[in-house]
Amino acid sequence: MFNSHEFFKKRFSAHLKETSRYMRYIFNGHIMVALLFFISALAYYYQQWLEQLPPDFPTSLILGVILGLLVSYSPVRTLLKEPDLVFLIAAENKMYAYFRDALLYSFVIQLYIILLVAAAFGPLYFASFPDRAGNIYLLTIAVVLILKVGNLVANWWMLKVREPGIRRIDLLVRTLLNMAIFYFIVNGDMLLAGVTTTLFTLIFLYDLYVSRKQPGIVWDLLVEKDQVRMQSFYRIANMFADVPHLKNRIKKRQWLVSIVSRVPFTNDMTFDYLYRITFVRSGDYLGMYFRLILIGGIAVYYIPNIWMKVIFSLLFLYLSCFQMMTLYHHHRTIMWMDLYPVDLNLRKKALVKLLYQLTAIQAVLFSLLFVGMQEYGGSVIVLGGGIAFSFLFINGYVKRKLE
């Protein structure tokens, strides 16, 4: 007899085994050192900033928006796969235990985000409201957990609705109500918080009513949602290891391709052309590169100490170079590349050349940021130090890893 609870346990065990294998590559020594340094420096300057917090700082608004988004984003992980569309539809009336376990699993894996946000914004809350007792903040976190469960269940009910427009409107309304609830709670307006909570309850009951009117489970939508989330995880893991399950997303970006693809039409420039096109058209590398520049630029701009600005600039240069070196293995599973009549050393040289160019551009951008902040000495140090660091890292670490 089919036991959906046991089936979920087997599916969960296989899922955990697969993800944990890639997590070891993601949180390797290099990333952990960079994260430890980044978090330590951020915590230090966060504490300094709180000591000078202005009395009119909009803490209620900020916490309302962040906590509202936190509870509204409550995806349901079903762990379903494409073959389930054939083999499990017939057992739909026996899948109650499976989906119950899936909802519980979805809630548990999102708890760590709640704990991180609660720990991160706790000091801001107590600095803004020093006269409030600590149990008031704990009560706010308890409301977060309750609304997290409510939104998770509501999202599950709305996954029975095939029309995406209805799902989007429902999510938008619940998100706005969640933000309003937490804004009023943090601001101390408990009456208005009660009113908005009542409105949320009505929406919650309406979602239940709508879901019960649906003929059954929309299996293809559940599989599609889960595949999208797994592909997102694979794209992150692919930055650190070869992921055969990844379905590479290709974007045209013709105007950008026309700029970077201007290389001589010669045999020794084959991989120069290939890696440039891959960097631009792949759905991962270009976005990651610019996100690291943006985040690094924001950190450099707001950190007050000049030497910490320089260190953070070098840290994000290191992260960019470390992430982009996975371009070398991007086409690893494509057999016809082995047929290229091109020396393997030219392939390595092409990647090293591209890494030099990308890190040099990033060093120049960080240097210009220092000029904009009128830190001219720091600009020279970042430009010279960044180029020197890139040279030493690429020649000392990257080339050794490519062997």
Image (cartoon, rainbow, N blue to C red):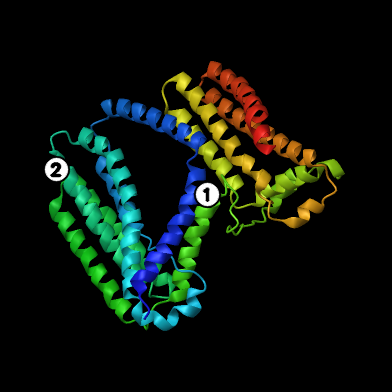
Residue 178 placement: quadrant: bottom left
**Residue 125 location (% of width, % of height):** 23, 38
Where residue 44 sits, quadrant-wise, is top left
Disc 2 residue type (three-letter): Asn
The mark closer to the camera, 1 or 2, is 1
Residue at 78% in and 38% down:
345
Nearer to me, 238 or 378: 238
Residue 135 disc label: 2
Q: Position of residue 276 (x, y in %)?
A: 71, 44
Image position of 176 with respect to 368: above or below: below
Q: Is mark 1 on a helix, strand or loop?
A: helix
Specify the amino acid type for callout 1: Ile
* Of residues 303 and 146, the one drawn nearer to the viewer in this rendering: 146
In this picture, residue 301 sits left or right of residue 49: right
Instruction: Answer with mark 1 or mark 2, whichever residue precedes in sequence.
Output: 2
Say which quarter of the image contains residue 120: top left
The answer to whether 18 appears left or right of 72 in the picture is: right
Q: In which quarter of the image is the C terminus?
A: top right
Q: Quadrant of the N terminus?
A: bottom left
Relative vertical location of residue 103 with respect to residue 298 in this rendering, above or below = below
9 left or right of 194 in image: right
- Label 1 crowding class (10 Å Cα cut-off): few <14, some 14-19, many 20+? some
Closer to us: 126 or 112: 112
Q: Are marks 1 and 2 in contact (CB under 8 Å)?
A: no
Q: Distance between the residues labelled 1 and 2?
A: 38 Å
Pick out the residue farthest to the top: 377
Q: Which mark is residue 236?
A: 1
What percent of the width, then of the height, locates residue 381?
57, 18
Q: Is residue 374 above or below residue 25?
A: above
Specify whether residue 388 is in view.
yes
**Residue beneath the point at 37% across and 65% down:** 9
Q: Which x, y percent locates residue 176?
A: 31, 58
